[in-house]
Image: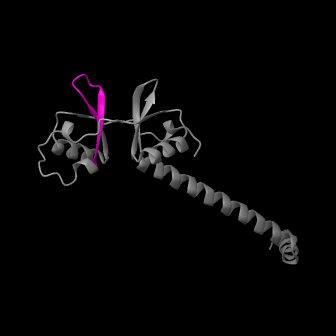
Amino acid sequence: MNEPIRSYTSHNLQVIHWSQTLVEASSLMQTHRIRHLPVVDDQHRIVGIISDRDLRNREDKMEVVRDRMHFEVAGIDEAAHVSAAAEQMVAQKISSLLVLRADRVVGILTSDDLLRVLTEEHKNFVQKIAENLTAKVESQIYRSPIGAILNQISNAGL
């Protein structure tokens, strides 16, 4: 998990204006199958973030995003390592980070993205172990008396 996060970042960043309703935010999240939306103001500056959790159990669905969003938005440089991003998310108890390139937002990294990285790394780790074990077992077999017999059979073309 020491690779830069730029490889795992969602670059198709969806945003919502802070005057839009929670219904519109929910619809945008469902349409794009996402759980976090950066919130922009009239100058299209990111001023907060809203998540699917912020939309749950809200009676007034016509309420505007500005009233439910989080004004503090965490970010991380795209060259940072995945492990640094994970550590930051755990320390701040958040599930997304805006990804920055020279102080410009270029994407978002979420806990789902980190789980995909972890799953991919786990599969690669298991595959390497399996390959090493197979090679060791084959090596041991061919050094044994059975291996000598198998070599003779193979050499005989049977």
Q: 136 or 38, which is in the foreground?
A: 38
Residue 25 lies, in percent from the top left, at 21, 42
Residue 38 lies, in percent from the top left, at 30, 36
Q: Is residue 81 left or right of residue 9?
A: right
Q: Quadrant of residue 21?
A: top left
Which quadrant is the C terminus positioned in? bottom right
Q: Is residue 127 left or right of residue 57?
A: right
Q: Is residue 131 left or right of residue 97?
A: right
Residue 14 lies, in percent from the top left, at 30, 36
Residue 31 lies, in percent from the top left, at 25, 46
Q: 158 or 55, which is in the foreground?
A: 55
Give the overall secondary structure of the magenta segment. strand
Residue shown at 19%/55% (left/top)?
57
In the rendered image, residue 41 lying in the magenta stretch gets the answer yes
Residue shown at 17%/33% (left/top)?
19
Is residue 115 depicted above or below 85 in this figure? below
The total of numbered circles placed on residues is: 0
Q: Report the magenta residues as a range.
A: 38-52
Residue shown at 53%/41% (left/top)?
84
Residue shown at 46%/46% (left/top)?
91
